[in-house]
Image: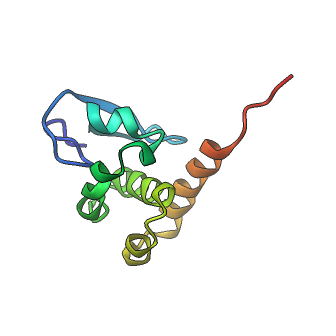
Amino acid sequence: MSMNVCELCGSEERLTAYTVAPKDDTITICSTCAASIDDPTSNEKHWNCLHDSMWSTEPAVQVMAFRLLTQLGAQDQLDMMYLEDDLKAWAEEGLATERQEPTRD
């Protein structure tokens, strides 16, 4: 984990740790990434940075890039990206959790 720059976009502004659930692994992200990570379509141009970060050697960064590219429908980038089976399972598990509708009593 890099504490000096955002591991998704490279920004050095207002950095924070972000947990890549369901594991406890964290990545460093900036306030811009943090603001739109739950709804990446709200700031699609910002996520052009994923073209670089998807090649990170850090598993948690790869997982987050995969999830964001999936949510953005960036199939060309996803087709180029390779994840080990365990990382892909981690990434997809997080996507399934994000897509679940809240339970209403």
* Residue ranking furthest to the top: 105
| Residue 8 shown left or right of residue 83 in the figure | left
Q: Residue at x 29, y 52 (%)?
A: 45
Quarter holding residue 4: top left
Q: Nearer the viewer, residue 9 or 91?
A: 9
| Residue 50 shown left or right of residue 102 in the figure | left
Q: Position of residue 58 (x, y in %)?
A: 30, 55
Q: Nearer the viewer, residue 29 or 84?
A: 29
Q: Residue at x 51, y 63 (%)?
A: 88
Quarter holding residue 26: top left
Q: Nearer the viewer, residue 90 or 14?
A: 14
Q: Position of residue 27 (x, y in %)?
A: 32, 41
For the N terminus, give its image quadrant.
top left
Q: Residue at x 28, y 35 (%)?
A: 32
Instruction: Give the answer, above or below, for where 44 lies relative to 57.
Output: above
- Count of all numbered marks drawn on residues in the image: 0
Q: Residue at x 39, y 38 (%)?
A: 36
Q: Position of residue 12 (x, y in %)?
A: 13, 36
Q: Position of residue 49 (x, y in %)?
A: 25, 55
For the C terminus, give its image quadrant.
top right
